[in-house]
């Protein structure tokens, strides 16, 4: 089934397109330009339909951003508008649109235009198929190589496995928050973001050469030991440099080199190993610097107990303009609830679980999504569908309870918004646990995360997530709970 991305701020227009196209195509729905850009980076679409008038950036600017991605250079884009203006039509085609259609939609014409554009794109795609296959094989080899490197680190540092997983996720959160800035987005326009996030996980690869007695020392390091530890920056850089010399596609490893070498540099020049300052430090390393300190503060080490999320915010904020790039710190503060959400989900993971953990397939698993807002419902539904879940929708808590009581479908998981028209999520979960105490249930909120997360856990939810959904984090939590349930069954 062909994948289509639809971007429109109007709930009515999105609903109309969804009703028309959902039986034929795999749809993803977005209400803003920035959300669309995030989706475009994480998924391949066969065709894009975008309105001219959008929040954050208009459809023309969005079109320019999309065409900057190498893999979207030939993707068909249909622009739509409420009015038929010659200057808008000309501008759309000059900037790279393939079609321009006005509202209200002539349904048969829209279907015909979509079909024609997909046929043209499919023909062009077949021409480059052999080259694409080779490129994909190269990327997969690089990913496997990275996994092997991470396993080596885990064997030396008992805490590194979980550290690598958390750090990579924190890096993704902070990177996407920074990319809301047009200038930073421009810096990353030709970069494979998934490869950059993978590269961030190699920041401590140089610890392979650090003696175990220093790496896992339970007390403070001596001056000599600390200088030895600092060598992991150079060691990591040289390991990755030698690796990149053997590769044709070097981009991911080269980012790894920059991050490994410079993630301990400081904005004021007092870091190591090269005493770089301000923008002399690569941006990818300046991002890692904040991530690494947050992870270090909030994690348990052999020599210290973890400090709170709030204490990490305080420490990092005070170091803005000193140790850290102020712009990166500002993005960190804006995304702090997402950091906390990820930290809470990962916090229960033990090292032996990190080594054995793997995702199980979620395809054909039935999910009940309870969300009263129709636009949020469609957007989150699209996110969950893209992650492999089969979705059933409900707009109220009582309707959802009746669905679960009737057992017309065997749901494996329930997602409930915090605010429902007939009850709040805490009353809903109490009713749900009377009906089914074993089903996995998550609470969703876009506000006051700390309070909601605490109450959600106390009330009987298995987790709490910030909207819009972080599906990678969600999949981790879902699989982790399943793994825990199996261990309980095996031991009983």
Image: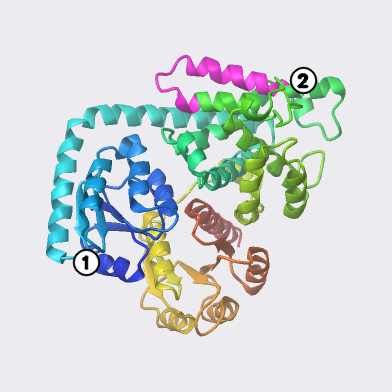
* SS class, disc 2: helix
Identify which residue is drawn at 63% across, 57% down: 337
Q: Which residues are magenta?
A: 231-253
Q: Is residue 361 visible?
A: no
As displayed, is residue 143 above or below residue 182? above
Of label 2 and label 1, which has the lower sequence position? 1
Q: Position of residue 309 (x, y in %)?
A: 72, 53
- Residue labelled with disc 1: 20
Residue 267 included in the magenta stretch of the image: no
Q: Nearer the viewer, residue 213 or 134?
A: 134
Identify which residue is drawn at 63% across, 64% down: 449
Q: Position of residue 2 (x, y in %)?
A: 23, 51
Q: Which numbered circle lies on residue 228?
A: 2
**Which colour assignment does the render follow?**
rainbow
How many numbered discs sit on the rendered protein? 2
Mark 1 burial class by Cα count in 10 Å: few <14, some 14-19, many 20+? some
Q: Position of residue 293 (x, y in %)?
A: 71, 40
Position of residue 169 in the picture relative to residue 370 (left or right) = right
As displayed, is residue 230 above or below residue 13? above
As displayed, is residue 222 above or below residue 1? above
Residue 250 included in the magenta stretch of the image: yes
Mark 2 burial class by Cα count in 10 Å: few <14, some 14-19, many 20+? some
Cα distance between the residues tagged 2 and 1 = 64 Å
Q: Nearer the viewer, residue 111 or 242?
A: 111
């Amino acid at each position: 089934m062909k994948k289509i991305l639809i971007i429109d701020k109007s709930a009515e227009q999105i609903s109309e397109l969804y009703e028309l196209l959902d039986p034929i195509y795999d749809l993803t729905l977005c209400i803003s330009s920035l959300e669309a850009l995030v989706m475009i980076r994480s998924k391949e679409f066969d065709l894009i339909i975008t309105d001219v008038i959008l929040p954050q950036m208009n459809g023309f600017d969005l079109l320019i951003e999309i065409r900057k991605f190498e893999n979207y250079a030939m993707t068909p884009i249909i622009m739509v508008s409420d009015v038929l203006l010659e200057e808008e039509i000309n501008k759309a085609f000059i900037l790279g649109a393939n079609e321009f259609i006005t509202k209200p939609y002539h349904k048969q014409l829209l279907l015909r235009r979509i079909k024609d554009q997909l046929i043209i794109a499919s023909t062009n795609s077949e021409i480059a198929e052999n080259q694409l296959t080779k490129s994909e094989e190269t990327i997969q080899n690089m990913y496997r190589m990275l996994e092997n490197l991470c396993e080596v680190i885990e064997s030396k540092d008992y805490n590194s496995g979980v550290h690598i997983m958390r750090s990579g996720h924190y890096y993704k959160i902070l990177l996407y928050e920074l990319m809301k800035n047009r200038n930073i987005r421009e810096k990353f326009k030709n970069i494979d973001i998934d490869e950059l996030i993978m590269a961030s996980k190699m920041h401590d690869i140089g610890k392979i050469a650090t003696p175990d007695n220093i790496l896992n020392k339970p007390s403070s390091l001596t001056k000599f030991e600390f200088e030895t530890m600092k060598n992991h920056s150079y060691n990591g850089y040289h390991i990755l440099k030698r690796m990149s010399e053997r590769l044709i596609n070097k981009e991911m490893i080269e980012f790894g080199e920059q991050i490994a070498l410079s993630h301990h540099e400081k904005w004021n020049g007092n870091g190591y190993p090269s005493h770089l300052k301000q923008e002399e430090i690569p941006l990818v390393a300046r991002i890692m610097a904040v991530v690494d300190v947050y992870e270090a503060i909030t994690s348990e080490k052999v020599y210290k107990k973890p400090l709170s999320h709030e204490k990490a915010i305080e420490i990092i904020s005070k170091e803005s303009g000193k140790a850290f790039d102020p712009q990166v710190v500002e993005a960190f503060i804006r995304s702090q609830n997402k950091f906390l959400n990820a930290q809470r989900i990962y916090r229960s993971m033990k090292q032996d679980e990190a080594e054995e953990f793997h995702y199980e397939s979620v395809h054909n698993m039935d999910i009940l999504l309870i969300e009263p807002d129709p636009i949020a419902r469609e957007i989150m539904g699209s996110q969950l569908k893209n992650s492999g879940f089969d979705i059933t929708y409900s707009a109220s808590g009582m309707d959802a309870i009746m669905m679960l009581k009737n057992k017309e479908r065997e749901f494996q998981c329930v997602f409930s918004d915090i605010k429902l028209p007939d009850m709040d999520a805490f009353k809903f979960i109490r009713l749900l646990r009377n009906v089914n105490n074993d089903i996995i249930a998550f609470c969703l909120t876009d506000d006051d995360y700390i309070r909601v997360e605490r109450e959600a856990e106390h009330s009987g939810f298995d987790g709490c997530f910030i909207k819009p959904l972080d599906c990678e984090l969600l999949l981790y939590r879902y699989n982790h709970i399943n793994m825990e349930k199996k261990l309980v069954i095996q031991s009983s």
